[in-house]
Amino acid sequence: MTASSDQAAIGALTQRMVTGWAYGEAETIADLFVEDGTLILAGVFCNGRDEIRDYFAQAFEGKYKGTQVTGKPISIRSLGPDTAILLSSGGVLEPGETEVSAEGAIRASWLVVRREGQWRLAAYQNSPRYDAAAGAGAGRAA
């Protein structure tokens, strides 16, 4: 899995998420996942691509309407020839924002697997990002 092409394909998942979000395409985001993939956000648990698609379809009509998302890889580690963990930093941009607020900033873990030659998400989970020295912080799903 150390091939630079694999690392590039895994890292590109973050940009595919950003693009799907920019166009409000629940289908595009759901297709990042394997059929039995898992999505965990604050207060949200979706098991399977259909649940993930339904969640985002509703969210893009509700709480995420007009928002954008940003995310950049922090690290990629191989867990085997067809499995890796991608860690990223990002968050949701509210309408008019150009930078993620401290309250909206997150760190995420992406468990990725290669299936049928493509890297896809087996599981995605994020947590609020905050300054550990401050000892507290707030955040929301992204």
Image (cartoon, helix red, strand yellow):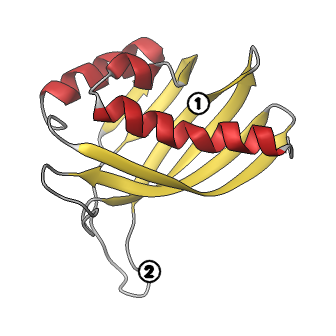
| Residue drawn at x 26%, y 27% as measured from the top left | 24
- Looking at the image, residue 55 sits to the left or right of residue 88; the answer is left
Amino acid type assigned to the residue bearing label 2 in the image = Ala
Q: Looking at this view, is 136 or 27 the one in front?
A: 27
| Residue drawn at x 48%, y 44% as measured from the top left | 125
**Badge 2: few (under 14), some or many (20 or more) residues near its Cα, within 10 Å?**
few
| Residue 90 quadrant | bottom left
Residue 107 coordinates in the image, percent (x, y): 46, 58
- Looking at the image, residue 116 sits to the left or right of residue 80; the answer is left
**Badge 1: few (under 14), some or many (20 or more) residues near its Cα, within 10 Å?**
many
- Residue at label 2? 132
Amino acid type assigned to the residue bearing label 1 in the image = Leu
Q: Looking at this view, is 65 or 51 the one in front?
A: 65
Image disc number at residue 121: 1
- Looking at the image, residue 52 sits to the left or right of residue 68; the answer is right
Secondary structure type for disc 2? loop
Seen in the picture, residue 124 relative to 58 is either above or below; the reply is below
